[in-house]
C-alpha cells in the first residue's frame, strides 16, 4: 500500500534531524521512479529540469503548470518531494502565500522559496520584503495545518553577489521568519559552507552540488544536512542526448549509442518485460 502524504511528510522532517542525505532532482515521473529505486530517501523537483523537458527556459512556466508537475512527482513514488517553488510566483507576500497554499495541496513535503526577482537591475528582493515573503510562506503553511517544511533560499551567490556576510544575514532572518531549512545555492568554499552551517544552527543547511568534485562524506563533515543537485541530472541526461544527436547530424554515425542504457534495463525498471 502506498504511503500516505502525512507519512511522507513525517519521514521527510525526520531526515533533517541528523546525519547527511542526498536529495536528487528528477524532472519527470520516469526519472523520479528510477531514483526511488536506487535507495534515495527523498526527492526534490528542479525548475530548470522541468522547464527544459517542456521546451521552455528556467523560470518560464506558470504556477498552474508547476503545481500539476509537483502533484505528478509526489504521486509517483513513496518518497517525500521538496518543491523547487522558485520565488513563489508573486512579488507581494500575499501572492506568495496564496501560491504556497496551492503547493501544499499537491502533496509535497517541503517548499523552497527564493529571494531572486528575475530583474537584472535589482536581482534580489529588498531585505525587508524578502523576510516578509518568507514569513508569509510560513503562515500559509501553518494555516493548512500540514507538516510541510519551508526552505529559505538566498540566491546572492548565483546572481553574482557572493557576499558571505550579507548572505548569512538573510539566511538567519529567513530562519527567524520560519524557514525550517536554509539554502544558499552557489556557495563552494569549505570556509563559506561551514560559516553558514554555524550561523543558522541548529537548523539544517542544504548544499547544491552541480559540478564534479567533492564527496558526500566530505560535505557531511562540514555539517551540511542535505545535498541536492538541482538541474545537474537533467543536464547530464541532455548531454547524452545531444552528443548522440549531434554525431548523427554532423557525421552520420551512431557510435554514441554504445553509451545508451540497455532497453531491457529501462523497460524492466518500469515494470515491463525485459527482452
Image (spheres, rainbow, N blue to C red):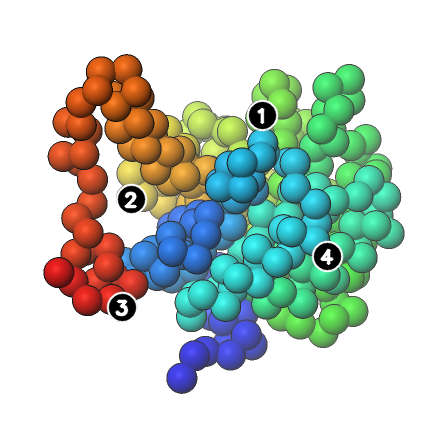
In the orientation shown, which residue stands out farthest toward the front? 252
Q: CA distance from mark 4 to mark 1?
A: 24 Å
Frontmost of labels 3 and 2 is: 3
Q: Give the class, few, some or many, for how many residues have Cα within 10 Å of label 2's Cα (few <14, many ≥20).
A: few
What is the secondary structure assignment of the residue under circle 3?
loop
Residue 57 relative to residue 220: left or right? right
Q: Quadrant of the C terminus?
A: bottom left
Q: Which residue is mark 3?
A: 271
Q: Position of residue 155 (x, y in %)?
A: 63, 32
Q: CA distance from mark 2 to mark 1?
A: 24 Å
**Of the image marks 3 and 2, the number of the one nearer the N terminus:** 2
**Of the image marks 4 and 2, the number of the one nearer the N terminus:** 4
Q: CA distance from mark 3 to mark 2?
A: 33 Å
Q: Which residue is mark 2?
A: 217
What is the secondary structure assignment of the residue under circle 2?
helix
**Of the image marks 1 and 3, the number of the one nearer the N terminus:** 1
Q: Position of residue 142 (x, y in %)?
A: 74, 67
In this view, 196 is above or below 146: above
Q: Position of residue 213 (x, y in %)?
A: 30, 29
Q: Residue at x 62, y 23 (%)?
A: 159
Frontmost of labels 2 and 1 is: 1
Q: Which residue is mark 4?
A: 100
What is the secondary structure assignment of the residue under circle 4?
helix
Amino acid at each position: 500500500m502506498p504511503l500516505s502524504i502525512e507519512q511522507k511528510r513525517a519521514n521527510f522532517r525526520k531526515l533533517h534531524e541528523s546525519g547527511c542525505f542526498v536529495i536528487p532532482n528528477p524532472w519527470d515521473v520516469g526519472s523520479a521512479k528510477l531514483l526511488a529505486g536506487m535507495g534515495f530517501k527523498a526527492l526534490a523537483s528542479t525548475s530548470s529540469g522541468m522547464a527544459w523537458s517542456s521546451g521552455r527556459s528556467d523560470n518560464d512556466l506558470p504556477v498552474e503548470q508547476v503545481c500539476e508537475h509537483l502533484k505528478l512527482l509526489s504521486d509517483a513514488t513513496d518518497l517525500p518531494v521538496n518543491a523547487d517553488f522558485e520565488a513563489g510566483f508573486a512579488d507581494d507576500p500575499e501572492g506568495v502565500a496564496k501560491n504556497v497554499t496551492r503547493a501544499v495541496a499537491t502533496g509535497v513535503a517541503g517548499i523552497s522559496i527564493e529571494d531572486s526577482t528575475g530583474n537584472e537591475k535589482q536581482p534580489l528582493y529588498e531585505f525587508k520584503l524578502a523576510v516578509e515573503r518568507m514569513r508569509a510562506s510560513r503562515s500559509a503553511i501553518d494555516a493548512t495545518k500540514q507538516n510541510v517544511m519551508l526552505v529559505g533560499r538566498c540566491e546572492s551567490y548565483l546572481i553574482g553577489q557572493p557576499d558571505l556576510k550579507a548572505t548569512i544575514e538573510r539566511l538567519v532572518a529567513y530562519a527567524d521568519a520560519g524557514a525550517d531549512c536554509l539554502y544558499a545555492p552557489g556557495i563552494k568554499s569549505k570556509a563559506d559552507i561551514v560559516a553558514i552551517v554555524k550561523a543558522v544552527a541548529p537548523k539544517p543547511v542544504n548544499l547544491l552540488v552541480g559540478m564534479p568534485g567533492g564527496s558526500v562524506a566530505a560535505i557531511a563533515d562540514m555539517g551540511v544536512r542535505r545535498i541536492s543537485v538541482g538541474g545537474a541530472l537533467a543536464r547530464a541526461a541532455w548531454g547524452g542526448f545531444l552528443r548522440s544527436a549531434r554525431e548523427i547530424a554532423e557525421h552520420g554515425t551512431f557510435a554514441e549509442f554504445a553509451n545508451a542504457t540497455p532497453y531491457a534495463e529501462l523497460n524492466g525498471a518500469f515494470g515491463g518485460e525485459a527482452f
